[in-house]
Image: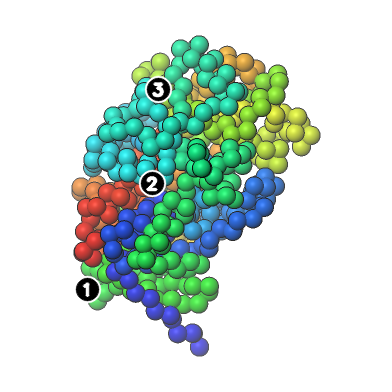
Amino acid sequence: MMPEASVFDADVVIVGSGPGGGTLARALGERGVDVLLVERGDILPSEPENWSADAVAGGRYRSAERWHDAEGGDFNAGVHDWVGGSSKVWGACLPRFRAEDFAEVEHREGRSPAWPITYDDLEPYYAESERRFGVHGISGSDPTEPTRSGPFPHEPVAHEPALARLDDRLRAQGLFPFALPLGVDLGAGGRCVRCHTCDGFPCRIDAKADADVSMVRPALETGNVRLLARTRALRLLTDAGGRRVAAVEAEHDGEPVLIHGRSFVVSCGAARSAALLLASANDHHPHGLANSSGQVGRNYMAHNLTELIAIGPRASGATFQKTLGVNDFYLSSPGDGRPLGNIQMMGKVHPAMAGRLPRAPLAARRLLAPRSLEMVAISEDLPDAENRIALTPDGRIQLRWVPNNLAAHRELVERARRMLRRAGYPLVFARAQTISTSHQCGTVRFGTDPTTAVLDPLCRAFDLDNLLVVDASFMPSSAALNPGLTIAAQALRVADLAGLVSGA
């Protein structure tokens, strides 16, 4: 006999506590809205392993969930199930998308479509998101920087000596490196200690601006937001007419849960949000919830990423090195004028992270790591309807993804190699990600035409009266920058304009 389901109720039910769901929960809670925040993960513990390269490389904080690929094989999904989502291990680089990213852009292998909103529509919410995340930065050094209504909330994070030298050497090449916008609690009274375990690691002292620290915890402090952790949403149930979501069917610690609400927001991440809508098919919505367009799950995008490890003749002394970026090739290449992408420093590579130098024995990695600087080249992955999230017959996620725009990415990597060699690093190793779940987006995209988009410009489903999707799913293109700040900015815009305060 099945156990009876526990029942919960709220005006607004948000499924997922990452940068979208967490930010929306805080914004609504501050407006006095009764919110239930549902998260499949738990609160990430503060423990010594947070700063252990062996523990992190061994997958201690990564979900064990496996997805299928197009050929029927399976792979680790590479996602993180915690309050705050995968932002618990991000590097807290929080750039704004460029103004040009909101317009149609021609690439070598196709076009990225225009968004139904402009940069100016999002600019005030970018500013508020930067304030809430406590972003450090400075205007004027990035040649692609969009207009701003005000300065960054905090001064830029200063380069360590090795990065300052690199900055000088790049400028000597005619490039315009800039200070990465970073969400870290650094400065007078700040908690950040500029350690070597930031990018890719949980922060043991809560000095990193993630969706948990910056959004969920302040949301709970309003007294209007409740958190239901360790709760996996299984499907959304509609009312008799099929026009409204009535409840979320879920499991809390393995026991059945039924969650009622007036409005429902799905914020599970691009792959899982699409999967939840597809799994919620019923007689009114036989192809999945909100899927009359047939677009749910389609146009999956994940950035083309290549890690570069530059080896110099002497120890770099770098510890907290994720402070410098290069956007000289973001909007156009010197060759044909088409975009290539972004280059930025990433967190310090530890010898235990063998995958980044796969053929090097541990002794060699220990020798090379102190002499290295690490960067990542990021190029846009263009929307393709055949790149998609689907469900296997037993309900597991299947990712069908063939990367594109690779010629531009290869040129970006080569230009990054060249600039690093000219800067005094004669050995530059490159490792491209093969099947990528980094910065996933695009599976439930927004637009103005319900035949080609799932959501309207405020992330409300065209097919249902009380369903929204607020995470990277809504993005019609991926740009070539970390999407976290854009997700949060859109969540604030949704809170401001989508009618959720009144429970509409």
Q: Residues within 10 Å of mark 2 (few under 14, many from 20)?
A: some
Residue 306 lies in quadrant: top right
The residue type indicated by label 2 comes to Arg
- In space, the residues marked 2 and 3 are separated at their CA atoms by 23 Å
Circle 3/circle 1 CB separation < 8 Å: no
In the rendered image, residue 78, in percent from the top left (x then y), is placed at 55, 50
- The structure residue drawn at horizontal position 37% and vertical position 41%, both measured from the top left corner, is 130
Residue 147 lies in quadrant: top left
**Which colour style is shown?**
rainbow
Instruction: Mark 2 or mark 3: name the one nearer the start of the chain.
Output: 2
When the figure is inspected, residue 495 is found, relative to residue 486, above or below; the finding is below
- The structure residue drawn at horizontal position 70% and vertical position 24%, both measured from the top left corner, is 315
When the figure is inspected, residue 258 is found, relative to residue 473, above or below; the finding is below
- Identify the residue under disc 3: 141
- The structure residue drawn at horizontal position 27% and vertical position 41%, both measured from the top left corner, is 124
Q: Secondary structure at mark 1?
A: loop
Q: Which mark is residue 11?
A: none
- Identify the residue under disc 2: 132
When the figure is inspected, residue 196 is found, relative to residue 296, above or below; the finding is above
The residue type indicated by label 3 comes to Ser
Query: Nearer the observer, disc 3 or disc 1?
Result: 3
Instruction: Mark 2 or mark 1: name the one nearer the start of the chain.
Output: 2
- The structure residue drawn at horizontal position 67% and vertical position 34%, both measured from the top left corner, is 357
Circle 2/circle 3 CB separation < 8 Å: no
In the rendered image, residue 492, in percent from the top left (x then y), is placed at 30, 50
In the rendered image, residue 241, in percent from the top left (x then y), is placed at 22, 73
- Identify the residue under disc 1: 241
The residue type indicated by label 1 comes to Gly
Circle 2/circle 1 CB separation < 8 Å: no
Q: Residues within 10 Å of mark 3 (few under 14, many from 20)?
A: few
Q: Residue furthest bottom?
A: 1
Q: Residue furthest front?
A: 188
